[in-house]
Amino acid sequence: MSVQRIATRYAKSLLDLSLEKDILESVKDDMVLFNKVCLQNNDFVLLLKNPIVPNSTKGKVMKEIFSGKVQELTEKFLDIVLRKDRESYLPEIGREFIAQYNAHNNVVRADVTTTIELTDDLRSEVSKVVNSISGKKVDLVETVDESIIGGIIIKVGDKQIDASVSSKLNALKRDLTKNQYVKQI
């Protein structure tokens, strides 16, 4: 069975259980925390994916990290995944849960790249633009990248709006290097 299929099934189960127990927001926060730990600590992800490390050790590490910080349902879910020998899929399950949560709540993720940190006014303007395009609530993920020189890049799903100075300069460079002159006889 493919990784995506496994992640989708487990994430859907967790989403359904959290809806049933009416603790969806808390479980979503737990999975955001889990994803954050996975992103910030590659050793943790390598531990989960290592077949040599016994499950008891992996369970102790997860209890040490998450005990008291997450809902009881989330702890039990992590324990079940561990007992079923699916712990190597936990990072993908965490990402898939957030994707399913967003779909359930009609939320779209927008990755915004600028050269400076967004002010509250700019943040609300970008949210309005993305909302008008998608018709959904917007979850902005901001990135500061000085290499774009100026302007803004907005990515929503498979669409991208690139209004950065660097892309305009690259387009100008491309146009200038093309030989537009055609010799006529």
Image (cartoon, grey):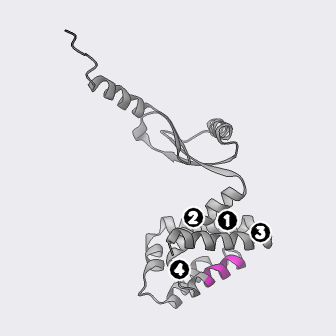
Q: Earlier in the sequence, mark 1 or mark 4?
A: 1
Q: Earlier in the sequence, mark 4 or mark 3?
A: 3
Q: Earlier in the sequence, mark 2 or mark 3?
A: 3
Crowding at dot 3, Cα within 10 Å, few <14 / some 14-19 / many 20+, comes out as: few
Residue picked out by circle 3: 19
Q: Earlier in the sequence, mark 2 or mark 4?
A: 4
Gap between marks 2 and 4 measured at Cα: 14 Å
Q: Kindly identify the residue that appears in the image at 55 percent across and 86 percent down.
A: 60
Assign the C terminus to one quadrant of the image. Answer: top left
Please state if 89 lies on the left or on the right of 123 as rendered.
left
Crowding at dot 1, Cα within 10 Å, few <14 / some 14-19 / many 20+, comes out as: some
- Count how many numbered circles sit on residues in the image: 4
> Quick check: is 76 in the magenta stretch?
yes
Q: Kindly identify the residue that appears in the image at 47 percent across and 73 percent down.
A: 45
Residue picked out by circle 4: 87
Residue picked out by circle 2: 95
Q: Kindly identify the residue that appears in the image at 47 percent across and 69 percent down.
A: 41
Gap between marks 1 and 4 measured at Cα: 20 Å
Name of the residue lying farthest toward the left: 185
